[in-house]
Amino acid sequence: MSELVLPNDTNLLGNLMGGRLMYWMDIAGALVASRHANKVVATVSMDNLSFTHPIRMGEMLIIHAKMIYAGTTSMVISLKIYAENMKTNSKILTNTARMVYVALDENARPTPVPPLIPETEEEKEEYLKEKERREKRKKKQQQHC
Ligand SMILES: CC(C)(COP(=O)(O)OP(=O)(O)OC[C@H]1O[C@@H](n2cnc3c(N)ncnc32)[C@H](O)[C@@H]1OP(=O)(O)O)[C@@H](O)C(=O)NCCC(=O)NCCS
């Protein structure tokens, strides 16, 4: 997904507002998840997001969103955000994040999604890492109960 950063997207310094970036990330991730599930999806979580590089007005924002894991009803989408300066052709990776979406049925309850079959070595590695992360999160949740 690409967006041109316009004045209405920026703060008083002329940089893209964090909230606007998160909005676009959420849409990009939801499109990937909905296409996989063929269902309406809800955003369940986003992991730590740091803003380490300002994205300037007039730059092009490019969001790469890729599904890396499917559980029973949830899907994990990895996002990479790039800022491209169209005058200099420079392209910088500005943010990364993982977002989790859940597919919903007609009653807005979680509903199963098709499995994800990782193909390349990198995809298999990402899939396993995500599986471990998820197991750790579930263990932590159980400890707090
Ligand atoms: C999405 C929602 C329906 C899930 O309901 P729930 O009762 O929590 O459902 P479950 O506990 O069965 O969890 C569903 C899945 O989400 C996963 N999940 C739940 N909380 C999670 C979290 N914090 N991080 C990652 N995954 C999470 C579960 O592991 C489960 O995955 P699985 O089916 O692949 O094993 C409910 O939490 C909700 O309505 N949330 C609000 C969503 C929203 O308004 N989003 C913003 C606008 S889209």
Image (tube, rainbow, N blue to C red):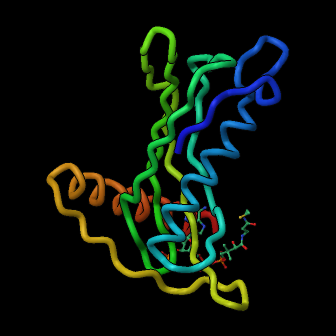
Q: Position of residue 138 (x, y in %)?
A: 49, 67
Q: Residue at x 55, y 61 (%)?
A: 31
Q: Is residue 87 above or below residue 34?
A: above
Point out the quarter of the image occupied by ligand 1: bottom right
Q: Position of residue 96 (x, y in %)?
A: 48, 36
Q: Is residue 109 above or below residue 143?
A: below
Q: Position of residue 98 (x, y in %)?
A: 49, 49
Q: Residue at x 85, y 14 (%)?
A: 12
Q: Residue at x 57, y 77 (%)?
A: 103
Q: Is residue 63 above or below residue 143?
A: above
Residue at the extreme bottom of the image, as rendered: 107
Query: In the picture, residue 11 is in which quadrant?
Result: top right
Q: Position of residue 104 (x, y in %)?
A: 63, 81
Residue at the extreme left of the image, as rendered: 121
Query: In the picture, residue 93 is in which quadrant?
Result: top left
Q: Is residue 80 above or below residue 99?
A: above
Q: Residue at x 61, y 25 (%)?
A: 51
Foreground of the two, 135 or 23: 23
The quadrant of the rendering that contains the C terminus is bottom right
Figure disc tally? 0
| Residue 30 shown left or right of residue 37 in the figure | right
Foreground of the two, 98 or 79: 79
| Residue 95 shown left or right of residue 106 in the figure | left
